[in-house]
Image (cartoon, coloured by chain):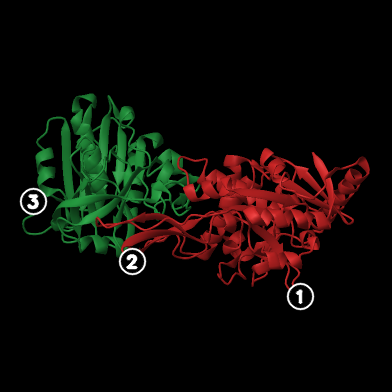
Chain colours: A red, B green
Amino acid sequence: MIFVLDEISLRNLFHQWLLNYKIFIPELSNGQKIPNLALLDKEKLEKFSTTVFLNIRTSEPLKAVFSLPKEKVAIFNDKEEKEGKEDKEEKKNLVIGAKVCDLRPLAVLKKMYLEKNFVLEEFREKLENTLIISADCPFPQESCFCNLVGLKPYAEKEVDGIIADLNLSFIDNKILIEVFTKKGEDLLKDRIGVKLEEADKEILEKQKAIRKKAEDYLRKINEKDLAENISEKILVAKEKFWGELLKTCVECFGCLYICPTCFCFLLGDFFVENHYERIKFWDTCYHPMYARVAGGLNPRAEFYKRGRNRFHCKFANFYLEYNFYACSGCGRCFHVCMGKIDIRKILLSL
Amino acid sequence: MSKIFTPIKAKILEIIDETPTIKTFVLKPEEEFNFLAGQFAALTCFGIGEGFFTPSSSPYDKEKVEFTIMKVGRVTSGLFNLKKGDFVGLRGPFGKPYPLNKFEGREVFIVGGGVGMAPLRSLFLALLHDLPKYKKVYIRYGARTPKDLVYKSSLFEWQKIENVDVELTVDVGDEGWQGKVGVVTILLDEIPCDVNTACAVVCGPPLMMKFTLQKLLEKGFHEDNIYLSMEKNMSCAVGMCGHCRLGKYFICQDGPVLTYKEIKDIEDPFI
């Protein structure tokens, strides 16, 4: 089912959803070219314009909604005293405007946190309690390369096992809403005073043309494909290769903290009032202490080994196991890099 | 909250001084805790954090579980400050156990270095439980000095068991030491078992692992019959956090014991 509506109707829908959901939405501040991931409230909604969805993905990775940068994962005590309280979310989450390059990362996290031998409850709960409305990406930027890693700048029904509930496309001053799931269909039932019309052939043709234009642009800026056997090539690349390509890295770890597919974390214990809390923090394998063992031995003391490990993880080991890259081509790593390291150059020089 | 990250409590029944830097903590878990030889667990020193250790006691002992621990870092220093009657947190067991069924009918050649004897003791006690199932069990164990040998009294007892062959060495002897002197590989010059069928199990510090492996290969042990304990940094122990990556493996899930065949293409696997 694909429906058409106008901006006023869409805002009206947002108003109604705001009553029941905590809504995450892209937000553009003055002078910014890339939106931030923000919480929507009534005040913001008054000034809200759907043009924000025409931008590329938000600065912050969407994974932050599903795996918080700092999150309590266990409460325990060494005495008989009462243990601490769990953090419970009252409202369900609704993410609006997620780009494909933020959907694949959820697939990566799902593989790591849910589909191996154990389940990360915090992630499972958030994934179950969050509705996702994806949005087409009609104007990719030069830093974008989703096409190189096997994605399109719009969500078809399934992205590596992650299915958004609804999808938005923007055609002239109209909005197309495509229903992907039953949950999405139910979401559209909360629409007092909003009329949905079925999309006609003409507007669907326009949608197709806009999508093709975005794909053509990506093809233009990322002309050369990654080598077919890139995983094997990465695994045999030598020290010199990594050293040369990563030589401008200042080890700020920005690329990994901003990466939507990085799943690494570190657990730390903290004493709070009368109990202990185990906190999960996002972690980065570029940190020199990441692989160091007690006593001081470090298998990745040299930076080239840590750099190599990142590429092995995303483009070789993960790909060989799950048949898609642990990279979505969002370009965030390049955007934040002080050393101007473009991951594409590394991949294309293999 | 994730149950997988919540430790159960375990009471310290006893702390045994093994060497000046190694102690064995005898624990009584407050909830059921069953493990197989070779699997490891996370010990929480409350207020400090978690460390990962393989039990050194028999998996058949349902009354208690023992961990032999060397003081090397933050968590182990915290554990060393605890006393009998205190509590630690316990999470696990994790990882794959030693494949005892593959050892059946064969000779098992155990090589340990320093505190690396801890998981091997658990393995040995498991083998001892069903000793007739195995053709013969050999233990080759080395430590820096006689004072650094763990389980001293047990080692001499094990030497007396039929179908068990124990040889010890120390890097540097002292006045009372009557045994061999030299690194553990000197005990591998003569291999008394059939290298075509025997299984070798190795655990110890990285350099010892590296040279022991070389020697075992030289002597003709098959690549898939050499079992190596891989030590890596860990945080979650459930295959999610990424810290224990070694090539395509997550040591906490695919290990901690891997065969040489599985890791032979990985550069510097032991550090």
Give the amino acid at mark 1. Gly
Q: Residue furthest front?
A: A193
- Give the labeled residue for mark 1: A31
Q: Is residue B175 left or right of residue A198?
A: left
Are discs 3 and 2 less than 8 Å apart at CB? no
B11 vs B76: above or below = above
The Cα–Cα distance between marks 3 and 1, rounded to whole angstroms, is 81 Å
User: For the residues tagged 3 and 1, is the chain the same?
Assistant: no
Q: Relative to B32, is B151 above or below?
A: below
Residue, x 32% and y 38% (percent of image)? B219
Q: Which residue is mark 3?
A: B178
Query: Comparing marks 3 and 2, which lies closer to the viewer?
Result: 2
Q: Which numbered dot is residue A273?
A: 2
- Please state if A315 lies on the left or on the right of A29 as rendered: left
Question: In the rendered view, does B114 fall on the left or right side of A254?
Answer: left
Query: Is residue B161 or residue A57 the one in the foreground?
Result: A57
- The three-letter amino acid code for the residue at tag 3 is Gln
Front position in the image: A196 or A153 = A196
Question: Disc 3 to disc 2, how far (Cα)?
Answer: 56 Å
Q: How busy is the neighbourhood of tag 1: few (under 14 within 10 Å), some, or many (20 plus)?
A: few
Instruction: Please determine if labels 1 and 2 lie on a single subunit.
Output: yes
Residue that lies at the very extreme toward the right in this rendered image: A202
Q: Amino acid at mark 2?
A: Glu
* Residue A180 appears anywhere in the view: yes
Position of the C terminus of chain B by quadrant: bottom left
Q: Identify the residue at image location x=60%, y=69%.
A: A249
Note whether residue B170 is visible. Answer: no
